[in-house]
Image: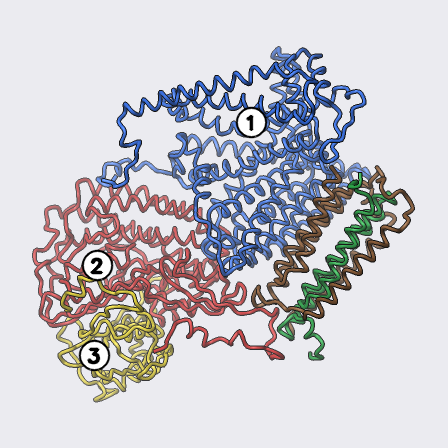
Chain colours: A red, B green, C brown, D yellow, E blue
Amino acid sequence: MKTDAVDIVLESQPDINVELNGSQIQHDLPTEEMLVNMGPQHPATHGVLRIVLRTDGEMVLEAVPHIGYLHRCAEKIGETVAPYQYIPYTDRMDYLAGMNNNLGFALAVEKLTGLEQEISKRATYIRIIFAELNRIASHLVAFGTYGLDIGAITPFLYAFREREYILDLFESACGARLTYSYITIGGVTDDLPDKFVEICSEFLDYFEPKVKEYNNLLSHNHIFVKRTADIGVITGEEALDYGLTGPVLRGSGVRWDLRKVRPHCSYDEFEFDVPVGQGLKGTVGDCWDRYIVRIQEMEQSVKIIRQALEKLRGTEGQDVLHKKGKTIKLPDDDIYFEIENPRGQLGFYVQGNGAAIPARVKARGPSFCNLCVTDKVCRDVLLADVAAIIGSLDVVMGEVDR
Amino acid sequence: MILAVGLNHYLVLSALIFSLGVLCMATKRNAIGILIGVELVLNAANINLVAFSKYNAGVGDGHIFAVFVILLAAAEAALAIAIFMNFYNTLRTIDVDRGDELRG
Amino acid sequence: MDDLAFYIFAAVSLLSAIGIVASSNIVRSAVCLLGTLGGVACLYFVLDANLLAVIQLIVYAGGTLVLMVFGIMLTSKSPWVGFRATRGQVAGAVLVAILMAVGISTLVLTAEWSQSANAPLKTSPSVAEVGEMLLTDYLVPFEVASVLLLVVMIGAAYLARTEK
Amino acid sequence: MAPEEIANILKDKFGNKITGSNFETAHPHVLVEAKSWLEVARFLKEDPGLTFNLLRSISAVDMLEDDELIAVYDLCACRPGDRETDMCAFDEFCVKVKVPRNNPHIPSVANIWSAADWHEREAYDLMGIVFDEHPDSVMGVEGRHPRRILCPDDWDGYPLRKDYRFPMEYHGIPAVTEYEQTRPVH
Amino acid sequence: MSQITLPWIEKSPETLSGYRRKAILLLFVLAVGHLGIALVSLFAFKPGQLADWKIPFVLALVLGASLAGMAFTAGAFGVVFYRIIGKFLRWSYVAFALFLGGVVGACLIVWLHAEIFTFIKGLSAAEGEHRVWLLAVPYDHTVRNIYAGLEAIGVEVPVLAYALWPLQFEFIRDLVALGGIIGFISIIPAFGIWWERKVSARIQSRMGPMRVGGWHGWLQSPADGLKLIFKEDIIPPEGDPLLFRLAVYITFVPPICAFLALPFAAAWVFRDLDVALIFILAMLGIEVVGVILAGWASNNKWAVYGSMREACQMVSYEIPMGMSLLIPIMMAGSLKLTDIAGAQAGGFWNWFVFANPWCFIAFFTYYCAALASCKRAPFDLPESESELVAGFLTEYSGFRWSLFFFGEYAAMFIVAGLAVILFLGGWSSPIPEAWINSFLTAVGASPDGFFGTLARGLLAGGPIIFVLKATFLFYVQLWVRWTLPRVRIDQVLYACVQVMLPLVMVLLLANTLWILGTDHLQWGWLNVIDGILHWILVGIGVIVALAILCIALYGFKNNKRLVGQLAVVDQLPGS
């Protein structure tokens, strides 16, 4: 089985070593096409993504992503441990949105076992608060690193300054700052700490004006707009065809958010908007649209958290963790369940066979599906645009490779 | 003192650089190597001009000539490299010995 | 001091020139050319031709040399591609070059120059004087040169254009 | 639209190419025979009443007892609504395709949903289901198959199969620890 | 427990203090001995006793002994008072002053030497003694001659004459000046990098380096430099190792050469070239060759990309940069930087930036082009991290890598200095000297007295004013870098060829005609318009300066604003 990745790429281009006497190809300047390995260690690839670029000078003719450098057999592990033991593994998939991953897996298992109806309201609201806080944290990282990709270093530090507060909140609730395992099967592991509601609403008051600061600093910066508008345009149809979800799909102008169209976790009780890309600075579906959708989603998340904190007031004393969470047996059935993760639709396919351990666990990572459009978008763009496009897709390699 | 520098020193230096430039033109088969040889020869000529201006004439004529030589050398280099590009475009090499083929 | 400077810079220029000829790698030749150009520019400083020296630096070293290195990079697949001349050609060329060097040197050393060759004139033209000459006595060549540059610019762009 | 209705539409259209269905489960689905999957898929995508334009996931499952592999296609319809006010309409559906374990061949739907490209590569890589006519195919020992995606291209075997044994070394690199080598494999 | 045994950790405190006592004793003995030798020899060698070739040995004996003695004394005191000195160094402002003292020290040495040099040149030459000694260097003064001159001003220290003897040679003067320049150049990156990190930290609402050296991490750059020197030196074997090494020096040396022609004040210039401006531009232009070679010799595709971008960018931006500079040249009518700066003396309204609208715009076009040619953000494409890993620096490490930064920071200071000399009045102070004199008279101090001279030296112009102005422009470069994203290569070239070049050409033409109308043809109406525009521009300048001052004060007063008021977070367990 001789299927070396580089050989395959080489197959598709003319042999550069052949003597081209009197060849019919006449270029502007006699330049050679060059194969460049962007990654696995490259600052713009957000982890261990490797993209083989076929370039003609600064022009990228073809960009083939190669993934798998962070493959940790997460699905295989799922077949050897009980669902509640698998929760910590989901943290490590999309490590920037651990709460949402926990939530996705917990909801899938609860739906499969019928535990869904028995989760207390308080636990549901706490789940929503943390999922949305985590969405803000994740979008902050996306915003900051996108600035880095474009060459602005300062927004990154601003984003991390705010994210630090969110991580403090998480730490106060569950003790961890990155891999929380807080939302678990049957609810959340522990009730909120004292004064959490006050501190959280204080944070929201502090955070809301910061979004304006980000817009002044980066979003409407002329150079930034020039770098991102009309770059990497994905139309709505293309986005659906490639299975893109989340801010990437909404950036293409499709108003599609699982929290609205098929609400899970009583999201239907909340009032919020779904921002979509409108092509304010260029074409609908360009990098700027995908970027601004994330910024606007942070504002909407703030709105949701405020409502959830309000709803939380009447629920003191309710049990936040269902007793059956650790002892459930999975029925001989399967389920595929998706939630709206910061990066898109995170789906878990869980198949049980009557035992406590699932027969098959599959995670459908939004980053994995969003990344597959790279090949299509990164054609005939400049080298710098590749960084801009990859950054605007906001992939987390932990989830792509699982 | 025998080491005291005069006009002759400059002229001999210029002669040596000139010969090296000619040698460079003769031995290099890379077209850009030949261009480098031409630059050497022009530099040798410039040294002469400036040295004579300093030691013999005392007016700026030598300087003016040298300015024009530098200017023409730059123009010549730009044009020559454009030609080499074309040459390379057709023959995929800049070996001058291959330039005798009467092909497009 | 001037004498010492002459010897140093002459040695730099000559050694770099030898390096150009001796090096088989064309990029190294170009780097050696930088040495020669710099050495010659310093010699101009020694000869009180300051304007010429800086022009040499800015046009040759900053412009032409970059152009050449560009040309090298665009026309070779690898830095190590070298086309060697045959042994006979090299021997002949060296012989001719040595004869030429000896011949010119002898000619120069035996020639009778109009003034005493070892007494430099104290008056060197200043920048202002050179500039004034360019715009008075040498105005026509100056303008012709500017037209020539324009023609070269257009010609170079024409030669390196897309062929359709 | 309820899954039963969609299943009925499909049964009317394709008859016995739809080999079964199950709606009494957490995951209602229909079973489609492998060789007609391509036309069913095209119908699901292009029929104006269905328009399942978003392929969410392809999950490959190994049923060792039944000696078959299942490819679970989870589809979703995103029908653009009124852009300014309304959400897109939501509809979901699931199709399962069963293939024998020793010769798993399913026609590739990557030309219908581009999203299937990477999902099919992943299903081949980890479970060994060969998707015929996949656009990113390479020639293997047993014919053309999709290129591997997560594992290295020269990896041997399909790690998610139930009877997979983890290799002891890969290109001279010890792949499992001493402890794991002595431990019984699941 | 670590298995490594360190002898000085194993020893008991008693042994340690024993060592210390011994060390102090030894150092004091050595110090007294050396100082004694120096003291004896101070009066021992009478002029005329020694042949000329022995002078260096006498100097070595005297200077070496006294320097060694002082060093040993300092060492002994250091060991005695090491605790107090440690505390002293931690004391913030003193430490910072010590650090900045380098600049002042370099200035002082150069100034002192200039005074001595004038003194020696002022002595009457020795009677008929023109001797040729070593490399045909004629000298005017014997030691006896200098001693006579010293005696005439009442300094009867024979050794001083020996010490002054070498200073009469031009090349020694050049060496001292070169030492001053190199000292200054070494301070720029060390200070510049530390300052850049502090500025960026301030912009990003964090602290920046805080540990090394006590106050605000002022020793961070030297510490980093030390680390870089000890790092492994990696040279890609597949590239061209010779050119790989050479490229560093081709990049690093030209910006330093440019300092040879950069005047810090009227007399504070190594060589006052009549073509100084073009010389500096040429030196900045040669840098690009080194960068191309660095990329080429690295045998790395990212490095080649970086160097090609650098070549495109620098070669194209040199043209608008040079053409912007032609405008002040035209105003001053000279290529000599001292002339150009001298033409702007006497108050900030005389600066060329306010002279007419064309100069005003030319200042900004020059500054933008200079940013691009220094490859500073937003034009830092050659080393753009997120696209090209590190551009042409990808394969460089350790000390070689840091030399590139020496070159870069030197070039940054050069372009800032050029902008100051050509547009912002050079070393002349914004306040006219006459005002300072009258102010001094008004407060009762004589303008020629000690304080008067000091005040005039500080306020009325000089190297310190020049360095301050250049440092401000340097700061603006940092400010821009940490605020803006990076542009793309096609946008960079578009901005140069399609925007900046036509603009600068129009400016050049307009300025030529303007000068022709105002200065040569003396059109009255144009002179009136010129005057009005001049004062409008001065007004704009004042407003901008005040605005920057206000913003700075506001930022200083509200320096906690960015961090926010989220006090409760501190009570969370994680904080």
Q: Residues within 10 Å of mark 2 (few under 14, many from 20)?
A: many
Q: Amino acid at mark 3?
A: Leu
Residue nearer the viewer, E118 or E255: E118
Can you tell which mark lies on residue D69? Answer: 3
Mark 3 belongs to chain? D
User: Which one is nearer the viewer's eye here, C60 or C43?
Assistant: C43
Residue A22 in the image: above or below residue A52: below
State the residue position of label 1: E104
* Element class at badge 3: strand
Q: In the image, what residue type sits under mark 2? A: Tyr
Q: Are marks 3 and 2 in contact (CB under 8 Å)?
A: no
- Quarter the N terminus of chain A occupies: bottom left
| Residue labelled with disc 2 | A89
Q: Residue at x 70, y 23 (%)?
A: E118
In whole angstroms, how far apart are the C-alphas of marks 2 and 1? 61 Å
Residue at (60, 12) in percent of width and height: E443
